[in-house]
Amino acid sequence: MNFFRSLFFLWKKEAPESGKADDSPRTFFDYRERAPEVLRYLRRERKIARRDLELIMIDNEEEPAWQVAHVAERLLPEVKLLTIVTGRQEYFSELEQEAFEEYGLLVIIADVRGGKPSGNLTLDLRDWEKQLDILPGEGYNNISNQ
């Protein structure tokens, strides 16, 4: 009988760990670091060559502009053309100049109220949590991502 008690005791200790959800809440900082992976995954799913990628990035105005600009900076080497759709254009003018000087890349800052921008892939930063979940081996309930 003691054998079964000790077995139950060990099983009870391991059960919460194996079924526990990720304790640390996801933050936009996680997305900032994983954004190039998300972009590569989406690009491969749509079968868009890197040299043909014309990205439309929709601003998440709930996040600070510097964080959104950092995401855009990390994606600059991956794109041919970047269009940022935002209501706060003044925050991205420096990024526009930097992209042209460093990469020779054209960055278009479009107004939210403007017409539909042209591009072949849209990255909506308002859905950043869903985008992290689509990465293979990732998700809120996956323990292996730590």
Image: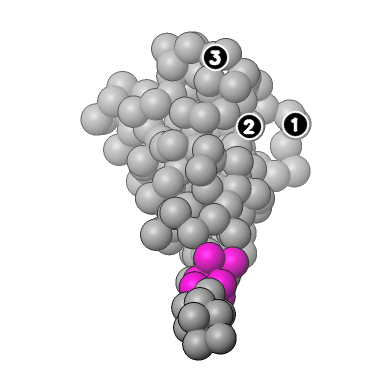
Quadrant of res 105: top left
Q: Which amino acid type is marked by label 3?
A: Ile
Quadrant of res 122: top right
Pointer 2: what residue?
Answer: 122
Pointer 3: what residue?
Answer: 48
Question: Left or right: where does residue 108 sit relative to residue 76?
Answer: right
Pointer 1: what residue?
Answer: 115
Q: Which amino acid type is marked by label 2?
A: Thr
Horizontal and vertical percent position of residue 74: 36, 41
Dominant SS in magenta: helix
Quadrant of res 5: bottom right
Quadrant of the snapshot with the C terminus = bottom left
Q: Are marks 3 and 1 in contact (CB under 8 Å)?
A: no
Q: Is residue 15 magenta?
A: yes
- N-terminal of the two: label 3 or label 1? 3
**Real-space Cα separation, disc 1 to disc 2, in angstroms:** 15 Å
**Real-space Cα separation, disc 3 to disc 1, in angstroms:** 24 Å
Horizontal and vertical percent position of residue 116: 73, 29
Residue at 42%, 37% (x, y): give it.
36
